[in-house]
Amino acid sequence: MARPTTPLLSRKSIRAAALEIVDREGLDGLSMRKLATSLNVSAPALYFHYPTKEQLLDDVASEIMEKVDVGAFAQGWRAGLLGWARSYRAALAEHPNIVPFLAHGPGQRDASLRRADTVHGGLVAAGWPARDATMIGASTKYLVVGAAMGSFSRGFVDDVQVYLDRYPALGDAHRLREHADAVDRDSFEFALLTFVDGLAARLARAEPPG
């Protein structure tokens, strides 16, 4: 019998199948046994490519982080920070169930560390002290990850009776769910621009008069 011209299993196909399960069932829904079943292979065949679930998720996370664009730092720290945050949120929004794993930090993931290096280097090159650059990077991540992990607007119910009388300041809260995507997007932009504008004012105050 002739051997197949392409391998039946590859690391790329394993990552794609794993991400499908995480997207559908969450992180707790992913197991190596379930993944093997979805690929019609035995569990040992998976372990040949990925000895642990953690290593597999690390590579899945790396693929997602490769979509995050930090190139705008070439245009200055403000453009860089805005571009990074928007791109970061967009990448996470495609796969919200994996956000808790990514929130743990970059670990040894090259894709994440290269971006962290660009962000930190771009801020320091623009005049931010190293400690401030670290806190700016962390604060931006808090903003992005928080926005990606849940929807503020969908946390309300669309029954006006819930809010009448008892919560007079929330008289229009029942409308939030209907406009959730727009409210969440605009709220993120509002927070991001307020944050970056505040940073710009802080940096201007710190610069010696010319």
Image (tube, grey):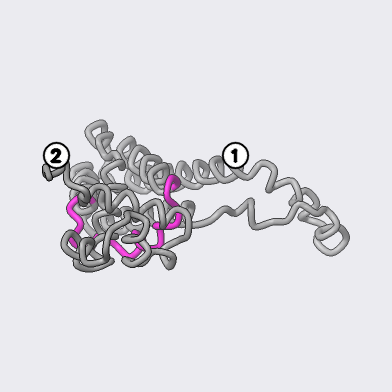
Pick out the residue farthest to the left.
2
Pick out the residue farthest to the right.
165
Q: Quadrant of residue 163?
A: bottom right
Q: Along the polypeptide, which appears first: circle 1 or circle 2?
A: 2
Q: Quadrant of residue 90?
A: top left
Q: Using the image, determine if residue 168 lies above or below residue 13.
A: below
Task: Name the residue nearer the viewer: 11 or 125.
Answer: 11
Indicate the position of residue 37 as horizontal and vertical percent values: 35, 60
- Mark number displayed over residue 123: none
Horizontal relation, residue 193 to residue 39: left or right = right
**At 23% across and 61% down in the image, what residue appears?**
46
Indicate the position of residue 153 as horizontal and vertical percent values: 63, 51
Q: Is residue 103 magenta?
A: yes
Kind of residue sitting beneath label 1? Ala
Indicate the position of residue 121 as horizontal and vertical percent values: 18, 47
Horizontal relation, residue 164 to residue 136: left or right = right
Q: Is residue 76 magenta?
A: no
Does the image show residue 210?
no
Horizontal relation, residue 2 to residue 173: left or right = left
Q: Using the image, determine if residue 206 lies above or below residue 75.
A: below
3D distance between C-alphas at marks 1 and 2 = 48 Å
Kind of residue sitting beneath label 2? Thr
Q: What segment is highlighted magenta in the picture?
A: 93-111
- Check disc 1 and report its element: helix, strand or loop: helix
Which residue position holds label 1? 182
Which quadrant would the C terminus be assigned to in this image?
Answer: top left
- Mark number displayed over residue 5: 2
Q: Using the image, determine if residue 188 lies above or below residue 55.
A: above
Front of the two marks 1 and 2? 2
Crowding near pointer 1: few (<14 within 10 Å), some, many (20+)?
A: few
